[in-house]
Image: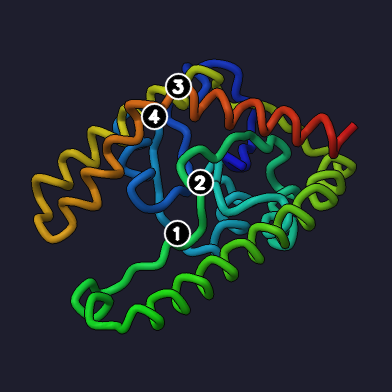
Amino acid sequence: MGGWFRKEIRTVADVKGIKMRIAGLRRTVFSRSAWVTQQIPGSDIYPALEKGTIDAAEWVGPYDDEKLGFFKVAKNYYFPGWWEPVRDPLLLNKKAWDALPAEYKEAFQAAAYEANVTMMAEYDDKNPPALRRLVQQGVQTAQLLPRDPRRRLQGRAAVLRRRVRQESGVQEALRRDARVPEDAEPVVRRGRAAHDQFLQQHIR
């Protein structure tokens, strides 16, 4: 999901000056436009939303967000969270990886794959009932600015290109990542369709 908002967002003008808790590279991307971004720890999000210190916040998804009680202080829950297609990619030291025997690499890859698939399966199981409960609590779900993800992906590409120039140690990885927005439109379209289907199946 894209995040929790204290007020309804209908147009790009509505986000002008919005103070949003959002972290990482996506914070840099959002900061390039009308958003006012802040990076605060998860434990501080609820009181900040409650007091109005921030107007919006993104965290994870229905199951995790419900546990933190964001729905009590922000009733508008928008999708999609296009900036985080997976959770916590695994980063390895290349020199150490190259030194491993082939069978160790295969075992490592199998374990990582199983851990990822298991986690995704658990969220696929837990998110729908959590989202249903949130809606029953009066939460309003909607798509956040349908045309905005394309602009955000383009902004993300620009940020990544700048990082490529600045950080030689991760140039190749960032180059690969920066190429993703070239195919952004079908990705956004598929994500939108998946979210629509998800909502239709599990809320109504």
Say if mark 1 contacts mark 4, CB within 8 Å: no
Q: Residue furthest front?
A: 102
User: Which quadrant: the N terminus?
Assistant: top right
Question: How far is the residue under mark 1 from the one under mark 3?
Answer: 31 Å
Question: How far is the residue under mark 3 from the one under mark 4?
Answer: 11 Å
Mark positioned earlier in the residue sequence (2 or 3): 2
Question: How far is the residue under mark 1 from the one under mark 2?
Answer: 21 Å
Q: Secondary structure at mark 3?
A: helix
Picture coordinates of residue 170, whole percent (x, y): 18, 57
Say if mark 2 contacts mark 4, CB within 8 Å: no
Q: Residues within 10 Å of mark 4 (few under 14, many from 20)?
A: some
Write down the residue under mark 4. Answer: 152
Q: Residues within 10 Å of mark 3 (few under 14, many from 20)?
A: few
**In this rendering, the label closer to the viewer, 1 or 2:** 2
* Closest to the observer, 154 or 53: 154
Mark positioned earlier in the residue sequence (3 or 4): 4
Amino acid at circle 2: Pro
Q: Which mark is residue 185?
A: 3
Picture coordinates of residue 129, whole percent (x, y): 85, 51
Q: Secondary structure at mark 1?
A: loop
Amino acid at circle 1: Ile
Write down the residue under mark 1. Answer: 40
Q: Secondary structure at mark 4?
A: helix
Q: Which mark is residue 85?
A: 2
Say if mark 2 contacts mark 3, CB within 8 Å: no
Mark positioned earlier in the residue sequence (1 or 3): 1
Amino acid at circle 3: Glu
